[in-house]
Image (spheres, rainbow, N blue to C red):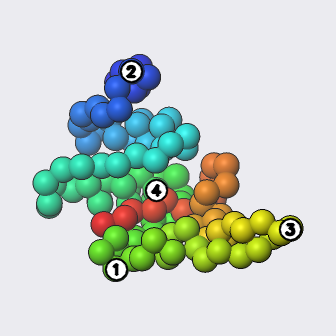
Amino acid sequence: MLGRLRSESAVTVTPDQLPELLLHVAVVRPVFLWGAPGIGKSPLVCAFAESLGLDCVTLLGTQLAPEDLIGVPQIVENRSRFAPPELIASASLPFRPHGPVFRIT
């Protein structure tokens, strides 16, 4: 399954395969889980986070504005850059075993 990700942008996985995908792929690039409502996507992600001793943070996409995720612009050394919220900024740094797992619904 992981080998297919090198050549494909989408793969189908079973619930049993999801932890491996998250463990090896989600640390390098975002993973989007798509499926019908009520099939257990959220509980699988939360169980994965719990199995690693990580928090699972739920963000409701319908109640977020872009600046809620990327932050507001600030001037640093005469250049404009975005200052994301602390929780998002800490998660965007290289993978750390104590960082949160985000579940955006």
Q: Nearer the viewer, residue 52 or 11?
A: 11
The residue at which mark 1 appears reads as 63
Q: CA distance from mark 1 to mark 4?
A: 23 Å
Picture disc at residue 7: 2
Label 1 close to label 4 by CB (< 8 Å) = no
Lower position in the chain sequence, tag 2 or tag 3 = 2
Q: Quadrant of the C terminus?
A: bottom left
Relative to residue 55, is residue 60 drawn left or right?
A: left
Q: Position of residue 42 (x, y in %)?
A: 29, 60
Q: Position of residue 82 (x, y in %)?
A: 65, 68
The residue at which mark 4 appears reads as 49
Would you call the spot at circle 2 few (<14 residues within 10 Å), some (14-19), or many (20 or more)?
few
Look at the numbered disc 2 and give the secondary structure of its residue.
loop
Q: Amino acid at mark 4?
A: Ala
Look at the numbered disc 3 and give the secondary structure of its residue.
loop
Would you call the spot at circle 4 few (<14 residues within 10 Å), some (14-19), or many (20 or more)?
many
Q: Residue placed at 50% from the left, 76% from the top?
A: 68
Q: Nearer the viewer, mark 3 or mark 4?
A: 3
Look at the numbered disc 4 and give the secondary structure of its residue.
helix
Picture disc at residue 31: none
Residue lying furthest bottom: 63
Q: Position of residue 13 (x, y in %)?
A: 26, 35
Relative vertical location of residue 34 with respect to residue 73 in this rendering, above or below: above
Q: Amino acid at mark 2?
A: Ser
Q: Position of residue 22 (x, y in %)?
A: 43, 43
